[in-house]
Structure formats: structure tokens, C-alpha cells
Amino acid sequence: NMDRKWKWVPGIMLLMLLSHMTSALEVPLDLPQPPTIILQSPKDYIFDPRENIVIYCEAKGKPQPSFSWTRNGTHFDVEEDSKVLMKPGSGTLVIDISGEKAEAYEGTYQCTAHNDHGTAVSNNIVIRQSRSPLWSKERNEAIVVQMGVSLVLQCRPPAGLPPPVIFWMDNSEWFLPLDKRVSQALNGDLYFSNVLPEDSRNDYICYARFPHTQTIQQKQPISVTVLDKGERRPGFMLPFGATSTKMVLKGETLELECIADGLPTPDISWEKDGGELPSGRISFHNFQKKLKISEVNEADAGNYRCTAINSLGDAHHIIKVTVKAAPFWVSAPRNLILAPNETGILTCRVSGEPKPKIAWFVNGVAIENAPEDHTRKVEDDTVILSNVQSGSSAVYQCNASNEFGYLLANAFVSVLAEPPRVLTPPNQVYQVITNSPALLHCASFGSPIPTITWFKDSQTTIKNGDPYVIHENGTLEIHVAQPINSGKYTCIATNHLGIKENHVFLEVKEPTRILKQPEYKVVQRGMSAVFECKVKHDISLSPTMTWLKDNGELPDDERFEVDTDSLTIKDVTDEDEGRYTCIMNTTLDQDSASAMLTVVEATPTPAIRPGPPTDLELTDQTERSVRLTWTPGDEHNSPTQKFLIQYEDLLHQPGVWTNLTEVAGSSTTAQLDLSPYVYYSFRVLALNHVGYSEPSQSSKQYRTNPAAPDVNPSDVKGVGLEPGNLVISWTPLTGFQSNGPGLEYKVQWRRKDVEENWSSATVANLSHFVVSGTPVFEPFEITVQALNNYGNGPDPEVKIGYSGEDMPLSAPESVEVNVHNSTLAEVKWERVSLSSVRGKLQGYKMYYRRQHGLHSTEEDPDQQEQVLTFSGNHSEGQLPDLQPYSVYSLFIRVLNNKGEGPPSPTKTFETPEGVPGKPSFLEVTNPSLESLTLEWGPPINKNGHLAGYTLKYQQVNGTNEVGPIKVMTFLPNETTITIGNLNASMLYKFDLSAMTIKGSGPIITKEAFTAMDTSESSVHTHKNTTTKTDWKKELVNGSHSHIIKGLKPGLTYRVRVVARDAAEPTVHSTAVANRQVDIATQGWFIGLMCAIALLILVLLIVCFIKRNKGGKYPVKEKEDAHQDPEIQPMKEDDGTFGEYSDTEDHKPLKGSRTPSNGTVRRDESDDSLVDYGEGGDGQFNEDGSFIGQYSGKKEKDTHEGNESSEAPSPVNAMNSFV
């Protein structure tokens, strides 16, 4: 229940100091220097016409720069225009456009800062006025749609600057709810994946808010009426087609959008072909319809697939994303400070896609038009300045541009001869905590750049190397500061013009530590709780103790008393329960520790801790034991659970009480086992369920006599740390185990299996002994025995140790490689002699590396060296997972604990051809009714000479393979094929693999549909009864099957299919349904009916008998409950029959048309094209719905021109949404 947290303040300080170390070299402002632009407006500046235009341009330099401006490439005379003011001492322009036409000040501005040493220029700043044009007048026609179809309500706001923010609301100024079915696209249009009856309303209003002018405009309301219809498979409303493209710039945010239609509303999912979506940078919006990828890079290019799926099927759309890049800095040019006759280089490293063009300027003039300078040489992105002279200072501009943008950077070249100066304040004191980093600064300036040298205590020269690091800017870093590093440090800056020194001081402080932490407490209500928190800290630091309860401040209650090293809570209540934390803060670090307080209910007669035992007495005294007896104290309403006996060793550890043993709460005596040479004093504590009692008074002192040690040191080991030594170590005995004064250790050693005497040494107060001059890696027998003034300990156990190892001398020889196959090779070598290992043989390390493929002689720089370790004394091993058709090299080293021996001669071998990897991609394009085009790429790993490709394909239905497999082969240079004679609207599966002479590699699989037959067809049903009824029709789009619902049992139906081609509206065909067997003529059905009739007859006889006996039996109710269903087979001439139904649903099928008299003549119901949508005023919608039944004449186009609109603009009404 206790935790502890360590926090170190210097971490943040270190980051700040490191950032300071990487800052550029600055020229002090009291020295001559060319101008530097320090503040400028953004490249694209859109201003509000209600406010002044402020174009920033600030620069520093010595002497102070003067400023001038150009507008649209020509000089802009600021003084001639009374509306334009340039701020004194800067180039910032303030243009007062009140009462003026703001358009007059639009254009491209550039600021120039000039002094005697050069000219710096700003970016081109494009100034444009924000605009919020009015919505064009229009009249929106009412929209009538079928339920389940998709719908797009276009917004098309006026183009503003910047573009407006779009949202949809109703007449009550409530935002229209958006969900996965209804969503707003990036262009502002409102998309319905399917429309439902609740979407019918006459107040769909699109609003456009223009940010700069804070105005809102609205489009005229749109009315939508939804009619009833059925379900549909998914399709895409946005983007259009099977594929689309998207270009995005590197570093920007990529937004991809897919909006699908269908009923039920489709779910949208995203994936990237051939890769994974970048985790950490992706987010989904608009109910998964929008995918956003932030900080786009080159790896984000590729094909992104969005999938729409509902219960009827799915649809896919591929967005091909390409990543371009405006120019971005790899390394921008930096200011140069050169002494006369020095050489300097300006580099302008940029990247982008396409590759940027680089142009250099000097003082704002193209370098090719600048005065000739023989000391200057331009090489693409580099300017080399050789043997510069005083007076040749200038400002160079690098302009990198491509079609997506540009970068402009100023870098001055200042030619100075200046003696060193130290910029860090003198006598600065740095304070750090032990074991944390220390950074001592020595910022300097001079020309030539001074050399920095550090001294400690004015005499010791500090060199780069552990524990010191001298950084390029002169900062001295101590990785792990120790108290010994405290002192005075001197840095000296030197060049040929002079010398300058500076002194700083380092103080390394002791860390803050909590020595005694607060402990878990269980306290009864009304009692007191005390938490201790004793701390050790550096005496020179001022500590602050803070107590927290549940990570918050302590309650403002006088019951809480905070002392120097404790917290006391008086009269504890239930609200006091929680976690208490003490935090010790200094200016450099902190330490904290926590403990829980649990409050328990007080008993009617409160139980408290027991009273301390009394009357301690020692009896039965011997050399190694004594009996202790006592009298228990008051139990205080809680039985004593046990007694704890403690002892104090007044000789070895005075003041420290140690637990000796525990006895049951019913005992009042204990026999204690003792050790020699201890001055014992005993005390007893009682324990009940509340806690321990106070300790009893100490017993009389009882001294045991000294004796020889009972045990020897443990953990005896012998390990050589260096060649030629043996370090014998052990765990020393405690003072309690010493058994007497004069404790020493007798260490003995001798070489194993060699006839020689034991060597020995006796040491005291040590835990190890070093034997020098031993042979390399020899086994030794070692013992460590304890002894004191009263004798030796028991005979020690002999341990085996080894002297120090050295590096192996020999390399494995006779290395042979046997290649088993294209991915596995066996390596054999001759073992080295054990004497040459000079240590414990750990095994052999095999280093191997793929040099290059056999199809290329150039070495592959990306291939990393691989290592296999064979433990033990092996002479052979296998190399798995090799790459086929490649050249490998290997060598072997022997390994011991000290390191590796020399390498064997390098062995080169080749792997044979293998099967290739799978083709890099397989795409299906250009789907048509009867053909699909396949494109693929060669394998990334060919693993030999490609022999060609094998393509297998077949027709599939979901996961079932239903068509015959067809096989095609291709030459290696063939990567595309168009496959014909396919069935329309069918799914095909394609498996493609590459081949070498070794066989076929893994396959890549692709499934694709041929194009859907867009011909529309109607399914018509006709019920065969004694009276004529009309044909009912249902529309089917490009499908080969259809389910007819709502049929009635016992009736015979005729079914026919009428096809309609949009290009040939007068052509149709009729098909009769397959003949089916009439169930009423089946033998099993007749037998079943007979059995039911016989059963009913038996029941009638039983009822008749019971009635004759005087009993009453509701026969009619039973007969009604078991009424025989009416069966009407009504067989027709065409052999079809009716199916069973509940006879309650008399509604006509959707799309049927029934005359008011309920009858239909034969000549009116057979083949009338008007009935099927082929003639008259009827027409088919895009989804196959029969519009003519509902809308009559063709409706006018929704947009008939920009006519006037009378709805007022709600600018004032919508201010709350701005």
C-alpha cells in the first residue's frame, strides 16, 4: 500500500541547455554586420477591408538598415502615398484603407533592408482582400424521390476569399443532424446514402459563413418529398467511377472522402493496397466517410480503397494518391563570419517533388547580374568564397522553387578581424545533483572563430573524453557529475588577434532522500494517526516539506498538524481515509513517498492496543540458550494474538532492536537460542487486532562467551578479471556471526590437478583477495575459512575458480561451404586447439553477408552483415534463410568470455536459382460486359531468371468456386492481358504466379466483377383463378435472379420476365417460369389428408357417445379449432400451381396497377408496353423505379437559370453561429 515517486527537476533544464548549444553563431550588435530579416508577414496575406493593412518587415544590422519596398516587381514609393506609413526604425508598412478602394493596394510586395555591408530581402508577400460575394439568385424546384434511393443536395456557395465555411440548417435555425446515412461532403454538398420518409421537409437551407468579414449568407430553401420504395445494394455517390486520383503535398494533411448510397445504409471502411494505414497519423471523420492523414510523406503515396457494404452486397472505390512536395529545407544557408584571407562555403540544400530549381542572389540582385567577384564560385547549391578581403561583406539570397512553392533564405557573409570575447557572464555558479549531467557554458565570439580551452582549478587541462565532453560551441559537459567534480573552471578563448578567459563555478549537491517513509495505518474513529517522513538532504539547500491527501491539498482543519518530519491527524473521521503523500522539495530535486490511512469503526467498548508486558525474567541460562518469562499486560477488549520477542546487541549494534522469535498469545515464556559473543538485552511486544503494544521494559543484560566461528563466508567464487590474475570473493560474516573478537579470513588457493602446495593469505575487513601472476585461464581450487581469537571456523568447502581469460589466438581453418539448395548451406571448419582459446570456449561466431545477386555484379550497400553463434565446440553448422541466386561471403571466429579471436579466411559461395517471389502487384482494370484487363508487375525478388507467368482464373460465387479453372501462361516480358468471353455481372477470381526454372512462386490473388448488364427487366406474376386478375410487376436491375414475396398458399401463379433496353425502348421479350409439380396430385399428400379425415371421424364418434350419456361436449368449438384448411390447387393449362399463404395479405405487389372495377381483360394485361414502362408517359428512374406511376409528366430540371429569389439573407439572425 505504499509507493514512492522520484522526480528530477534538472531534466527540463538540460533540454533548454542542449537547445542553446545548437543555436547559430550570432555577431554581437556592437560590431559591423550586414542586415538580417528578423520579422516578416506571411507569404499569403488576406486582409479585412474594414481594418488597416499591416505588412511587417523588421531587420537588424550594424549600421541600422534602411528599408524600401517593391510592389508587383517595381519600386513602391511610400512617401508619395499619404495613406501609406512606414514605421520609424523599421520597414513595417501601415496602409490606411478607410474611405479608399482596398483593391488598389492588392499585389505582390517585397521588402529590402540595406546598409553599407549588404542587402537582405523578404519573401514575396501577396496581399489580397477578403471577399464575401452574394449568392446568385436561383429558384429551387421541389425534389420528389423514391425511398431508399440516394440524393445529393447541392450547395454551390459563391467563391469567397478565403473560402467560406459551409453548414446546413432548417428554418428554425437548427443544425440538420448528420450521421452515417446523411453527411456533408468537403465541397459542402449534402449527401443522402438513402432517403427515408422522415427526410421529407421543405426547409433544407445551405449557409455560407465568410470568416474575415464575419458575414453569413444562405441559399434558398430546398424541398424534398420521399415516396415509398425498397432496398438497394451499395454504390458510390462520391467520388465517381471505379477509381479517382488525389494529389497532396508533403507535410500537408491528406483528406480522402467516400460517400456511398444504398439501403440499408452502407458502412464505410478504408484500407491501403499493398500496405497499412499509418498508425498515429490517421483519423476518421464524418462517420468513417472521411479519412485524414496528417504530416503526409512519400510513403503515403499509393492506392487507397474505400469499401461500402450493407446486407445486400458491397462496392469498392480506389483513390490513387500521389505525393508531391513544395521545396523544403534540408540545410538552409547560415551566416558566415570570416576573417580576411579565410575561405567559407554557403550551402542551400533543398528537396521537393519535382526537384526545386535553385537561384542565387547577392544583395537582392541575381548573382549572374551582380558585379564580378573572382573570389566567388557558384556550384549549383553551393557558393564558395575564397581568400575573402575586408569590405567584401554581403548578403546572399538562395531561392529554391518548383511549381508548388518557393523558399527564400538570407545569409550574410561578414568579413571581420576581431579578437576573442567571452559572452557568458563571469563567475557564474552552476548547481547540480550528484549523478546528473552538468553543463558549463563558454559562449564566445571572434574572427577568426576562437579556440576554446578549459581548465579546472586554474591548473588541470581538460581534454575531450570520459567524463568530459567539450562541445563545438565551447560548452563543457560532465555526463555524471560527482562531488569530486565541484570547483572552479576556467575557459580560455584564443585566436591570432588575442586571448580572453572566463571563470565559472560548479557545485555538486547531495540528492534528497526520504530515509523513513510513512507507513500504512489502520485507525479507529476518534483516535489519532501519525505519519512519519524523515528526510536527508544537502545541507546547503533549503528543503520544503509538503503533505498531500489523495494528490490534493490537506483539508483546512486544525485536526491536521504538520511537524518538521511528521503529520498528525487527531480525532480521525471516515472522511480522513485516503492516501497521504509527503514531498520534500529543494531548488534542484525532490523525493516523495506515500501511505494509506484506513479508518475502522469503533467498538461499543473501544478496543485499543494491548498494554506492554511486564516483569521480564531470565532463567535456565546456558552458553547458547536462555529462558525468558514475562507477565502479559492489559488486553484492552481484544484478545492477544501473539507475542514478539526482540533483542538488542549492545556490543555490535547498540540501539537497534531485532526480531528474534514469536510465540502464541497464550504463552508467557519462551526458550531462546543464542549466539556467542553477544551482549543481549530482551524486550516483548503484544499484538491484538488493533496493533502492537508499546515495548516492555528491557530485561537484564545477558552476555554470551566468545567462541570460534560457527560458519564460513558464503558465496565463495574465483574469477579472473584480467589475464594473469584470480579474484577470490566472498560474502563476509556479520558481527553477530563472528562469535568473538579478531575476525579474519584465511584464503587458500592452488592449481587444480597439479601437484603443488596450497598458497594462503589471511585478511581482515575485506570481501575479496586478488592473486596475481597466474597462468591464463587455469582452474584453481580455492577455500575461504573464518577465524577469530578463539579458533578457526569449520573446514571450508573447496570451490573451483578460473584465472583470467585472454583473447583467442587462432582462427578456424579449412572452412568449406556445401550449398544444399537455394536457401540452405552447410558450413564445416576445423576446430581450433583448446590451448589457443585461452579461456572458456563459448562457441564459434559465423559472420556472413549477401554481396550481390548473380544478376548484378554491383555490391548491394543495403545488405547488413549477419551473425550466427554456434555454442560449444562445434565443427559444422547450417546457414538457413539464404536468398536464392546470390553471392555470399563468410568468415568464422572462435569465442570465449574475453572476446573473439581472429577471423578465418573469407569464403565466398553462390546460391542456385529458386522459385521467385509473388508478383509485385496485380490490378484489374477496364471491366466490360465480357472482358477484364489484368496488369501486373514482376516480383521484387526474382531469385533467378524469370521464365514467365502462370495465370489461373475461374468464376466464383462469394467464397465458392463454381466455374472451371482456366490456365494461361505468359512470357517474362508480358505484364498485361485482356481476357474475353466472360459472363456479364459475374465475379471472377484470378491467381497469378511467376516462374523460374525451379518452379512457380507464391500466388497473388485478385477478384473482380465484369461490368453489370444495365438492361432493365421486369418480373411479372399472374394469379390463375376463375376470374381474371391483372399482372403484377417488380423491377429488377441487371440481376439473373429475383425473389418474389407475398404469394398465397393454395394458388397457382404464372411468372414471366420482360426485358427492356434503354436504347431500344420498344423491344421486349417474355419468358415463362419453369413447370412445377402440383402438390395436390402427390400420393403422400392424399394419404395425409385421408389420415386427418379419419381422425376427425373418430373424434365425432366419441363426442356422439358422450352426448348420449348426458354429458355436454362443445363439438362445434373443437371443430372450429381444428378446422381443415381450404385447399385450392386450381391447376392451369401451363402446369403452374399456387403456393400456400395465410390468405390475409391481399395487397398487390409493388409496382402493380389495379383498375377500380377489380377486373383486367386479357388483352389489357398480357403485353401492354405502357403497363411495363415502355410507352406513354411512364419512365424509369436511374435505379429502375417506375416513375410514371407517381409523377406523371416529366418534371422540369431543378435548375432552370438564375432567377430572383425572395427569401431574405439571415445575416443578423445567424450571428450566434459565427
Image (tube, rainbow, N blue to C red):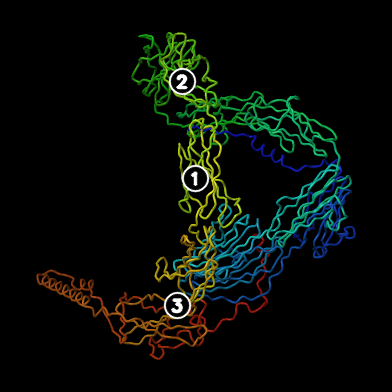
User: Taking the image as drawn, is residue 198 in sight?
Assistant: no
Between the residue at mark 1 and the residue at mark 3, the CA separation in whole angstroms equals 73 Å
Residue 1059 at x, y = what percent?
Answer: 45, 83
Q: From this viewpoint, which residue is outermost toward the front?
A: 814
Which is closer to the viewer, label 1 or label 3?
1
Sequence-wise first label, 3 or 2: 2
- Left/right placement of residue 692 relative to residue 430 reads left
Q: Nearer the viewer, residue 1043 or 97?
A: 1043
Which is closer to the viewer, label 3 or label 2?
2
Q: Residues within 10 Å of mark 2 (few under 14, many from 20)?
A: many
Residue topped by disc 3: 1036
- Left/right placement of residue 209 relative to residue 1180 reads right
Sequence-wise first label, 1 or 2: 2
Residue 356 at x, y = what percent?
Answer: 72, 58
Local SS, label 3:
strand
Amino acid type indicated by mark 1: Glu
Q: Which mark is residue 782?
A: 2
Amino acid type indicated by mark 2: Ile
Amino acid type indicated by mark 3: Val
User: Taking the image as drawn, is residue 241 in sight?
Assistant: yes
Judge whether 1174 appears above or below 103 on screen. below
Residue topped by disc 1: 816
Local SS, label 2:
strand
Q: Residues within 10 Å of mark 3 (few under 14, many from 20)?
A: some
Name which residue lies at 73% across and 65% down: 131
Q: Are marks 1 and 2 in contact (CB under 8 Å)?
A: no
Between the residue at mark 3 and the residue at mark 2, the CA separation in whole angstroms equals 96 Å
Judge whether 640 appears above or below 975 on screen. above
